[in-house]
Structures are given as C-alpha cells and as structure tokens.
Amino acid sequence: DADAVQALMRLLLRFTRNHKHAQLFAENNGLNHVMHLKETSMFTGFASLSTLIFRHLLEDDWTLRCTVENTVLGYLAGTVTDDNPESRNSGNIKEIHNMLQRLAPVASRAQHIFTETCEKYLRFTVPPNLK
C-alpha cells in the first residue's frame, strides 16, 4: 500500500542522513529494492524522497561539510539571498531569524556541521543603543 511505502521511505530518509547508515543501506541492496517498487506502491513525492536518499549515499562527511560551509558563507557574502532586502547586505545580516529561516534546510540536514560552521564564521554584535 502506498501509504505504508511512504512511511517507510520517510524512515529510510532519516536513517540514511548518517552516511555510514546510508552505506549500510546500499550494501544490503536497499537501492535495488527502492528502484524495483511496484507502480501501485508509488505515491506523490516518491521521486523527491528517493532522490534525497540517493543524495545521502553520495554525500560523505567531507562533501557535506563543504556544502554546508559554502552555503553559509554564500549567504553571508550575499550570493545566496532571501526575499528580505535587509538580508541582502553583504556581510551585514540585520535579522538573525531571517538567516536561520533561509538556512533551516541546511541546519536540519547536518546540525552538528551547521553549528560548527556558525561558530567558526559568525560574529554577532549588539548595537550600542540596545546594550
């Protein structure tokens, strides 16, 4: 049943977030099983979930760290922007919640790497009138 397959695919997605678990999944022929699901098991969003699972297989820790750092640094440099004009000033993010909203997918993909990256590159200052 498509609902059960969707639930299992979502669990697989969470399981494979850790690259070692993703490799274990692949070693146990998991990819083959996903690729040979019957058409009656398909659901809306199947392609997205399966693509993310495959991506987890390709992203080792080094690749993931580079991706997170490049995304955060790109946002800070103004090359990755959001819809808020206040956030577009290169190196001068005025609203931290806008930055966190924009980078939430990166943060949820690799929380420890995102935290380390933010600790390494971000500096916060409180305006004198707010001290």
Image (cartoon, rainbow, N blue to C red):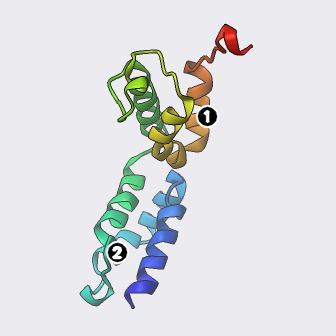
Label 2 belongs to which residue? 34
**Which residue: 53% across, 27% down?**
95
Q: Nearer the viewer, mark 1 or mark 2?
A: 1
Q: Give how far across and how far down residue 123 sits, in percent.
A: 60, 17
Q: Nearer the viewer, residue 108 or 86?
A: 86
Q: Position of residue 57 (x, y in %)?
A: 40, 55
Can you name the residue that lies furthest to the front here? Answer: 129
Residue drawn at (61%, 30%), measured in percent from left and top? 116
* Residue 38: quadrant of the picture: bottom left
Along the viewing direction, whichever of 97 and 105 lies nearer the viewer: 97
Q: In this view of the protein, which residue sits in the foreground, 73 or 130?
A: 130
Secondary structure at badge 2 equals helix
* Local secondary structure at mark 1: helix
The image quadrant of residue 33 is bottom left
Give the residue at mark 1: 115
Q: Earlier in the sequence, mark 1 or mark 2?
A: 2
Judge whether 104 appears above or below 119 on screen: below
Dividing the picture into quadrants, the one containing residue 52 is bottom left
User: Which residue type does callout 1 highlight?
Assistant: Thr
